[in-house]
Image (tube, rainbow, N blue to C red):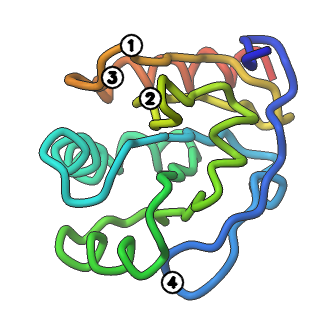
Amino acid sequence: MPISVGERAPDFTLPGTGGRDYSLAEHRGRPVVLVFYPGDHTPVCTKQLQTYRNDIGQFDALGAQVLAISPQSVESHEGFSAAHGFPFPLLADTDKAVAEAYGILGPLGFYRRSVFVVDAEGVVRYVHRAVAGLTFRPTAELVAAVKRAGQRA
């Protein structure tokens, strides 16, 4: 059963850029924007993460942490991040266990472009799972979701 708004976000620990592991629990006390994207170095994913990079100040102003997650290796993520200067970590869900826990795997086990906003208490306050991954959620929509999440926490 996919995770829905109002439910506790499944915790996870994944390896990521910067040579360390990241967990959802370590960010308790602040909102988290979980960005599930299908692949490094692909056109839409690159544009999406560049947009969030360019708008990172809007997330920072709300105390929100952005975590970008895809099934590629840490090595792939390191190259992708270095090429584009992403100021947020890219996490490697190589076995797709986190994707499965969040209900974002599409047909044939491919990642669906999805975004979750988790409030400071670890409760999901916004969910978007794309059917077709040709577009992504605009920063303004995610920032509004983070603001609403802060009002509930």
Which residue in the protein does label 3 denote? 137
The secondary element bearing badge 4 is classed as loop
Above or below, comparing residue 53 to residue 4 in the picture: below
Q: Quadrant of the C terminus?
A: top right
Tell me the CA gap for discs 4 and 2: 25 Å
Q: Which residue occupies 69% across, 31% down?
A: 102
Asked if residue 89 lies left or right of residue 126, the reply is left
Asked if residue 94 lies left or right of residue 6, the reply is left
The residue sitting at the bottom extreme is: 19
Say what amino acid the circle numbered 4 marks.
Gly
Tell me the CA gap for discs 3 and 2: 13 Å
Closer to the eye: label 3 or 2? 2
The answer to whether marks 4 and 2 mark residues whose Cβ atoms lie closer than 8 Å is no
Query: Looking at the image, is mark 3 or mark 4 earlier in the sequence?
Result: 4
The answer to whether marks 1 and 2 mark residues whose Cβ atoms lie closer than 8 Å is yes
Query: Looking at the image, is mark 4 or mark 2 earlier in the sequence?
Result: 4
The secondary element bearing badge 2 is classed as loop
Viewer-side residue, 20 vs 95: 95
Query: Looking at the image, is mark 3 or mark 2 earlier in the sequence?
Result: 2
Which residue in the protein does label 2 denote? 112
Rendered image: mark on residue 131: 1
The image quarter in which residue 150 lies? top right
Say what amino acid the circle numbered 3 marks.
Arg
Say what amino acid the circle numbered 2 marks.
Arg
Query: Looking at the image, is mark 4 or mark 1 earlier in the sequence?
Result: 4
Which residue in the protein does label 4 denote? 18
